[in-house]
Image: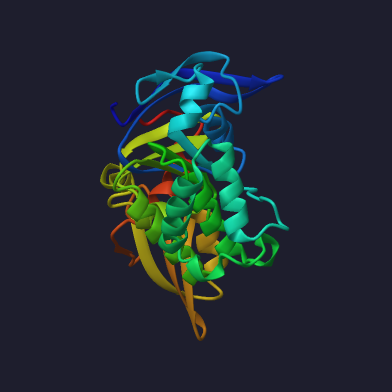
Amino acid sequence: MSLEIEIKNLSKNYGKKQALDHVNLTISQGMFGLLGRNGAGKTTLMKTLVTLLKKQQGSITICGIPVEETAEIRKIVGYLPQDFSMYPNMTVYEAMDYLGVLSGMSKEERRKRILKLLKRVNLQDDRGKKVKALSGGMRRRLGIAQAILHNPKVLIVDEPTAGLDPEERVRFRNLLSEIAEERIVILSTHIVGDIEATCENIAVMDQGKILFKGTVEDFLSLAENKVYTVKVSKKELPQLKKEYRVTGMLTAGNNVSVRFISDEKPPFAAEVCTAGVEDAYMYLMGERAGEMDVL
């Protein structure tokens, strides 16, 4: 069974709103980032891949299986939705065990698999706690454990780090990277830092369309020689923000170090700097979204 997802000409409407507009993607083993602001169509695409929504046009195959074969797809796909919640009055172990029963696993198989997974997500000492007593980060880690309980070939996670503190976010990113060593992991998010820290290949969505697909290195090249820094006074800052797309600021006394995007060299003493993923994203969304697809 090949570890590959093939999406061809996928479209879906909600009434007059086109949520997916002729999406074409090939996703292979490892971490794949799907980046876009809220409402870009990411969740619709994720729910279509996990068979919670039906496609209207186009085709999807996951590890060679057409998405229409719902039962077979659900055997090989794990899903952690953005609004994940499960059995709040059960303990962590009871909730996992119940899901194992639903998956048709034997008692001994469940015990071994659950203990192994809880250790992997660092919840082995919390297996007796009720789910409702867990912190946000702990619930997300439990979500990952339940999503891979049946050892799927594909794991899809939707906005998994939203609302987490920085330490928990780093821990969660590292966990996803480990899991991706043996399967496809799709990370759907609007948080640029999550993509930059974990993914080699990405796609950027907006208004149901794919604006970019390729490696992070290729993505960074979009903003090459277009990112500058300059130190200005606080009085000069409003005018600079009017004329350029500012991506970062650092205040020191009455001065501000500003990071901004410009297609041409500015007519003042600004220094060009290396573009990051956030710079490339801001450039793409500000300069090219809605005008052309970068494929």
| Quadrant holding the N terminus | top left
Toward the viewer: 54 or 74? 74
Name the spot of residue 283 as percent of width and height, x first.
42, 47
Give the quarter of the figure containing the C terminus: top left
Of residues 156 and 187, the one nearer the viewer is: 156
List the single residue furthest toward the top.
57
Residue drawn at x 60%, y 67% as measured from the top left? 128
Can residue 217 be spotted in the picture?
Answer: yes
Above or below, 52 against 35 in this view is: above
Locate residue 274: give its quadrant: bottom left
Q: Residue at 35% across / 20% down in the picture?
A: 64
- Residue 261's place in the image compared with 29, above or below, is below
Percent coordinates x, y for residue 102 in the rendering: 59, 38
Q: Nearer the viewer, residue 114 or 106?
A: 106
Left of 280 or right of it: where is 235?
right
Q: Position of residue 163 (x, y in %)?
A: 60, 61
